Amino acid sequence: MTSNGDLKISLAAWSLHREFFDDNLDQLGMLDACAEFGITGFELVNTFFRSPQYAYLRHMKKRAGEAGIELLLIMCDAEGDLAHVDKAKREVAALSHRKWIDIAGVLGCHSIRVNIRGEEDDPDAMRERAAEGLGMILDYATGTGISVLLENHGGLSSDPAWLRSLVELVDNPQLGTLPDFGNFPDDIDRYDAVETLMPQAKAVSAKCYDFDADDNETKIDFPRMIEIVKAAGYSGYVGIEYEGQEMPEREGIKACKALLERLI
């Protein structure tokens, strides 16, 4: 079982990044792994696509459908800085992200996740630039049903108040957050931070690292996190993103799945 009530469990492709970078597994093979784990949702990574051409995408969608797996979203990296101080570079970054809106549409994904990068000396100015860059992507996404998600993923984006204020500034129903249980600096309370981001969440990332003898995550209080997710009224997938070093990736995924099943 991977679901209970309004919460379901998905797998982030990044959980298997070591196998991918060792050339032992691609994203099509990760769909087979999802089926083996009994997981019904999958979150892709744009840099893991061997070929994002139409025939390949249709094949991926067909293979996922045959396995009973939903393709949920695409994590987009290395497509330029949406809050760059140079407006021309912001425009290039926005244009670079457009193809992933199209690809998400072919695959039946509900969202893409983008990064907010740029000069961070002035948070207010960066917020304005980021809003402009996001606006260019959202204009393209209008009418597609594809959402654009912001994750706490380093820099100012890992400041929950700043990230939430950016979403509020843009004020577009197709823009939301993707709270990650990790990715916060030590001086930020991760539980308060996730609670701050949950009202605008359209996806959730259950970052996990290591597990103790009782199968509990050792760095993050998962029961507390899941209660925060539930209290926000969130329904949908909670994505396993295993980044531990003490266990093989597949064992870490299984441990996180078992923990989430106990909690949801």
Image (spheres, grey):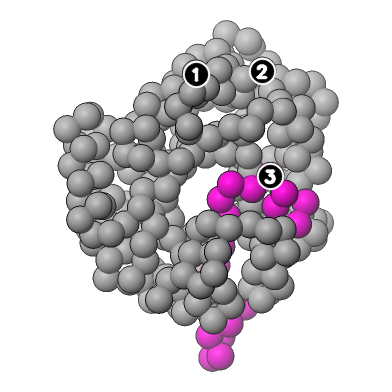
Quadrant (top left, top right, bottom left, bottom right) of the N terminus: bottom left
Kindly identify the amino acid type of the residue bearing the numbered disc 2: Glu
Q: Residue 160 location, x and y as percent?
A: 76, 46
Q: Residue 138 location, x and y as percent?
A: 56, 23
Kindly identify the amino acid type of the residue bearing the numbered disc 1: Tyr
Secondary structure of the residue carrying numbered label 3 = helix
Q: Residue at x 64, y 32 (%)?
A: 173
Mark sitting earlier along the chain (1/3)? 1
Tell me the distance, in whole angstroms, between the alpha carbons under discs 1 and 3.
Answer: 21 Å
Secondary structure of the residue carrying numbered label 2 = helix
Number of the front mark, 2 or 1: 1
Quadrant (top left, top right, bottom left, bottom right) of the C terminus: bottom right
Q: Residues within 10 Å of mark 2 (few under 14, many from 20)?
A: some
Number of the front mark, 3 or 2: 3
Residue at label 2? 132
Residue at label 1? 140
Q: Magenta stretch: give its range.
A: 195-218
Q: In this view, does 43 lie to the left or right of 225?
A: left
Kindly identify the amino acid type of the residue bearing the numbered disc 3: Gln
State the mark number for residue 200: 3
Secondary structure of the residue carrying numbered label 1 = helix
Q: Residues within 10 Å of mark 3 (few under 14, many from 20)?
A: many
Q: Is 237 drawn above or below residue 48 in the view shown?
A: below
Q: How crowded is mark 1: few (under 14 residues within 10 Å), some or many (20 or more)?
A: some
**Between 154 and 60, which is closer to the camera in this rendering?**
60
Q: Mark 1–mark 3 contact, CB under 8 Å? A: no
The quadrant holding residue 232 is bottom right
